[in-house]
Image: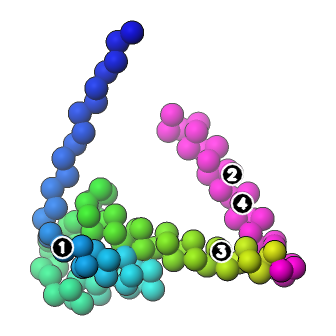
Amino acid sequence: MKIEILETETISNWCPLAEEELEMVSELASIGYSADKICLVLQRKKRLFIRDFKVEGTHINTAYYRGLLMAQADTDKAMLDNAKKGNITAKQQIEKKWEEQKIENIKQELFNS
């Protein structure tokens, strides 16, 4: 059996940030701040920050979208809790979300395998 080893592409970060700054990127993204506003808060060169924000796999891009996903997870957990307590609207919303995720999983399986 022959095993191929795929080379991983190195992604350069043009605007290096400390771990605390990356946590701030996630936190500010979670409350809806744009990349421009986060750059201003961190007092970084806008051109370099936005470049890293736009390139998938960079530390800024990853931190930003992680913040968005974690905030979404928090609200989804609250919605699930409400559904479990008998809130009909929350139950309908969570079921719709599950159905959408099931469809997304099928798409990923079909087109990205």
CA distance for labels 4 and 3: 13 Å
* Mark 2–mark 3 distance (CA, rounded to whole Å): 18 Å
Mark before the other along the chain sequence, 2 or 3 = 3
In what quadrant of the picture does the N terminus appear? top left
Q: CA distance from mark 2 to mark 1?
A: 36 Å
Q: Amino acid at mark 3?
A: Lys
Residue contact at pointers 2 and 1, CB within 8 angstroms: no
Residue, disc 2: 102
Percent from the top left, x then y, of residue 75?
A: 61, 79
Return the x and y of residue 79 as percentages of the image width and height: 71, 78
Per the model, the C-alpha gap separating discs 3 and 1 is 30 Å
Q: Tag 3's secondary structure?
A: helix
40 with respect to 98 (left or right): left
Q: Nearer the viewer, residue 96 or 23?
A: 23
Check residue 39 for magenta coloring.
Answer: no
Which structural element holds mark 1? loop
| Disc 1: which residue | 17
Q: Which residue is mark 3?
A: 77
Please tell me which residue lies in front, 36 or 15: 15
Residues packed near mark 4 inside 10 Å, few (<14), some (14 to 19) or many (20 plus)? few
Q: Which residues are magenta?
A: 85-113
Seen as rendered, the residue at the extreme top is 1
Q: Amino acid at mark 4?
A: Trp
Few, some or many C-alpha atoms within 10 Å of disc 1 (few <14, some 14-19, many ≥20)?
A: some
Q: Considering the numbered disc 4 on the image, is that residue within a helix, a strand or a loop?
A: helix
Q: Which mark is residue 98?
A: 4
Left or right: 50, with 74 as reference point: left
The secondary structure type at the circle numbered 2 is helix
